[in-house]
Image (cartoon, coloured by chain):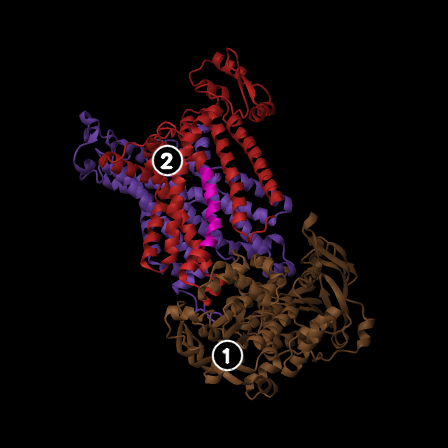
Chain colours: A brown, B red, C purple
Amino acid sequence: MTTHDLLKTTREPLVRVAGLTVDFGSVRAVDGLSFTLEAGGALAVVGESGSGKSASAYALLGLHRGTGARVGGTVEVAGTDVNAADDAGLRALRGAKAAMVFQDPLSSLDPYYPVGDQIAEVHRVHHRVSRKAARARAVEVLDRVGIPDAARRSRLRPHEFSGGMRQRALIAMALACEPQLIVADEPTTALDVTVQAQILDLLHTLRQETGMGLLLVTHDVGVAAESVDDVLVMRDGREVERGPVARVLGSPREAYTKELLAAVPRVETRRVVPVPSPRAEEASVPLLEAVGLRREFGRGNGKVAAVGGVSLTVHAGRTLGIVGESGSGKTTLGRMLVRLLDPTAGRLRYGGTEIGSLSEKELRPFRRELQMVFQDPVASLNPRRSVGESVADPLRAAGEGDEGRIRDRVGALLERVGLDPAHFERYPHEFSGGQRQRIGIARALAAEPKVIVCDEPVSALDVTTQAQVVALLAELQRELGIGLVFIAHDLAVVRQVSDRVAVMRGGLIVEQGSADEVYGDPRDPYTKQLLAAVPALDPGLAAARRAARKELAAA
Amino acid sequence: MTGFLVRRLGGAVLVLFALTAILYGIFYVAPGDVAQIACGPRCSPAQVAQVTEQLRLNDPLYVQYGHFLQGIVAGRDFSTGTGVEHCSAPCLGVSYQSDQQVTQLILAKLPVTGSLVIGAFAGWLLLGVGTGVLSAWRRGRLTERVLTWLTLAGAATPVFVIGLLLIIVFCSTLQWLPAPSYVPFAEDPEQWAWGLLLPWVSLALIESAKYARLTRSAMLETLAEDHVRTFRAYGVGERAIIGRHALRGAVAPVIALSALDFGTMFGGAVLTESLFGIPGIGRELVHAVKVVDLPVVVGMVLVTGFFVVLANALADVLYALADRRVVLS
Amino acid sequence: MSEALLVKEAGAAPVVAPASGARLFWRRLRAQRAASAAALVVLLLVLVALAAPLLTALAGQDPNAYHPDLVDSAAGGVPIGPFGGISADHWLGVEPQTGRDLFARIVYGARVSLGVALVATVLQITLGLIIGLAAALGSRWVDQLLSRITDINVALPIMVIALALLAIVPETFPRPVLIALVIGGINWAGTSKIVRAQALTLKSLDFVSAARLSGRGKWSIARRELLPSLAAPVITYAALAFPSNIIVEAALSFLGVGIKPPTPSWGQMLTEADTWYQAAPTYLLLPAGLLFVTVLALTVLGEGVRTALDPRAASRLRVGTKSAKHTEGGAA
């Protein structure tokens, strides 16, 4: 009889949390949370940033101890009263009974030691075994999580692993001491969608085989739907709704849950914004046209082509979506389109002028007409200048010298993107991520552009904010007839906004067509793989996709 | 790795070459009448003319510089007025004062400075890293605050001040130690060590302050990193986290700084040598500066530059080796 | 502190930090008790240095006036009277052998010490800023050239070069000015390295790309987007380099190649005091102690400046950080 069976027969829950509170200084991150998790069960804690979901998960292992955070309430994990346990008791719990899988697998492993040694070190903390036996155990668990040639790879350091392999190694570390519970904090957020699917499948298989419990913390409702039995939706440190995953996601009762689910972009949903007749597009001359655009980095033997010959067109009032995973060259392409990067080869024609080879000086007249909205809302605004000054930049550069007119125009732009025009004097750190993206959009609009390239404009935002920013972009496009290029890794978001879609991989476009064609009837095997990897909101559909992935992998 | 080494050392050679040009420019071209300096202030015009002839100062500048370089690479001959003296490579010229070859002069002084630096180096590394580890371990407690202030005081004290005080206390007042002096190791190892004890201690005390700072800040940086959190979350104890994970992060910067300091000191433990009367390169340099013995000054600066450039290259290589995250390129 | 460590520490300041502004900076500086005390000491020293002629006039003394009647020439020139000849006229005693007033010499010594270090620091920062910015913003060739020159500059051990340079400049050149020029002129590599690295980081950030897209020119971008963010690391560097420069000047003078008599300098007093420590300990302890206090106060103040300019460190002071938003992953 395994411990797991024993626990089940005694009906003692694996995790019992009652009235949990976590305070950071004067901020209450978790405010009276209670839940239980039966042995072998799987619970997802879902919430947007600031909901207190990670802080709750950390409390399960007593990780707030010594950080200055105050923890209240009771937390019992596998028979240990976490808040009352002494340091030795806590160490005996950590890793051995409950193990944590962190978000960023690269920074979560020690860069200086081989992966196998790190797993062995953890194993030896809890088991009195020889170094050799611990190393053997490390190789065993690495093999278990599907790392090929585990004995050799166990001697490599983390940076020699790929992102997905690192996450597998972290899961292997969690398995090393056969814990009864795995706490996974956003385990797939840093990963590409195809790798994410593999990791979720691995967690699913391990649960089935070992019978351990899983507590999954995620912002992504789709990830939760794929992986767990029960869902707990959190907001502002409190529980909003809790229940079986099919019920909560299928027929939510609370208003916030409904709002959250409505905001989640779905890969099945077509573009909602009405589009002018398709005939107009074919007739119209493209605003921006790239032919065989190529960009290389490095010199000599180290030369790599980030973009290896891409052709595309951008039309007024239309959106071209570009999807691809990390390293596909989509950002490099986007920066070339607005000439922030110089193409190595190929042509870039804007309104009849070849601008691909123009010098910085010759480019000046065109600069303002090609704008960009950036991914990182923190880095895209100068922290030392007021947002009004940043938005006013294109106006001043265009020779507008009248302070009053500049203020009026900036105020109008801020208002247009949904901000208070009186915020001219404020600094970027006073705004939230979504508001900063709006400021970035206002700055792009100030130049009165014809084309805006949006590079992952919503990937750093929560889903509800995402939906608002996407809606704003669509609205502005309709109003001003701007040609948009929308670059993203999220297939669902791209479908939502795009007329045409290009799928990128390894610096090349593998498939291009109207959004309905690409999503409804994908031709390229890579596109199929991508679409199969997208987590589904419906647990039934999720199971079907899992089966489809198995098939694709076997094929 | 080999490519990296070759490129790094190639760069070092280029820097050294540029250094010779700069030094030559500054010292032999700028000061004006080199012959007068070489001959001494009381020389008659006839004597000065003779020296000008001897030093071939009437040749075009680039020829003179060519001779200078040739001396370093292949050796050269000097006319001494009565005959010709060969100075074999690497020839840095002949002292105006003693007519000794600069290369010989420096070679004679190297073991002295070497003895001083090696002992002090061991001292400051042990003391500095030890203090750093201790204050990182006891962070936020009284021990750390006391150590931080001691380190600050160490960094704020010029080596000649602490040296003076040590001499006064231990040699003159208490008379526990003999006056610092240099006895060659081969002659009497015990006297060698006693004679150098105070210079070692004062240099180590001052230098250790910055190693303590570096170790502490590198360890605190590592302790704030995510991977330390991982090991805490797996029940690894504080001792293992400090000793195995945090300290490892300090290894690369400490090694790199050591290599750098070692090189710099070799060329110029000027103050310590002057204060304690240790007849090494630094004290010789001060003397040469005071009597404007140009060949000795230039030679010693060049040798110092050589050590520093070498140490810089070594520091880069060691850093790359110790920090496996750095991609050699 | 060594150059390498300085570069590492000053260069570690994050370039993308919210604007703090002068007022917030002062508040954060004042919140640190040690730094505030150090600032007071530094202020006092600066006042003393500025008011040196006034103070000596008040004491009725001249730093270069000999008083042979105050030393016992039979005993080799030991000052007459207790504690190195302290009296109502000579507040800190007199110099052995010459009988010059120590108070006057110490006060004028402060002038030299602080003045030389200040000019040297300003010079090294200015040179470093110009060279570093030019390397970061210029073409690849300019960058290559300037970076190599910086490498060479780093390879020059400052003490040794300063010594050598002082050997060849004619005695007629005003010595304090010369020393300041030498220290500042050969020691700019640290600043230029920091400035270049930070400017390159900044250049790669999206807000600079956005500024390019808005059609602004290179120099307008450098001035409006880069320079304000470079202020924090450069000021930090300057604050920590200042005390090192004081030590360098004292060391050069101690070796007898720095400030030449009769101009008073603490380092040079130390050399002379070396032989008098038994007969006149105050003569040694005064410049040694003052040098220590000055450098320590400046270092502590420099540390305070660094903390005040580094938002991560400043958040621990709980000044000017709006109840830091602890959201997800607050534990570490």
Residue holding disc 1: A1
Range of magenta residues? B247-264
Residue holding disc 2: B272
Q: Mark 2, chain letter?
A: B
Quadrant that contains the N terminus of chain C: top left
Asked whether, in this view, residue C59 is left or right of residue B327, the answer is: left
Asked whether, in this view, residue A547 is left or right of residue A13, the answer is: right
Q: Is residue A324 magenta?
A: no
Give how far across and how far down residue B88 sits, in percent: 54, 22
B115 up-or-down from B151: above or below: above
Residue found 48% across the figure and 42% down from its top? B259
Give how far across and how far down residue C318 sits, in percent: 39, 65
> Which image quadrant for residue B274?
top left
For the residues labelled 2 and 1, the Cα–Cα distance comes to 74 Å
Q: Is residue B261 magenta?
A: yes
Do the numbered discs 2 and 1 sit on residues whose CB atoms are within 8 Å? no
Disc 1 on helix, strand or loop? loop
Q: Residue type at mark 2?
A: Thr
Q: Residue type at mark 1?
A: Met
* Residue B269 shows in this picture: yes
B227 up-or-down from A44: above or below: above
Pointer 1 local density, CA inside 10 Å: few below 14, some 14–19, many at least 20: few
Q: Nearer the viewer, residue A258 or B188?
A: B188
Foreground: disc 2 or disc 1: 1
Residue that sits furthest to the top in the current view: B82
Disc 2 on helix, strand or loop? helix
Label 2 in the same subunit as label 1: no
A388 up-or-down from B53: above or below: below
* Residue C53 shows in this picture: no
> Which image quadrant for residue C215?
bottom right
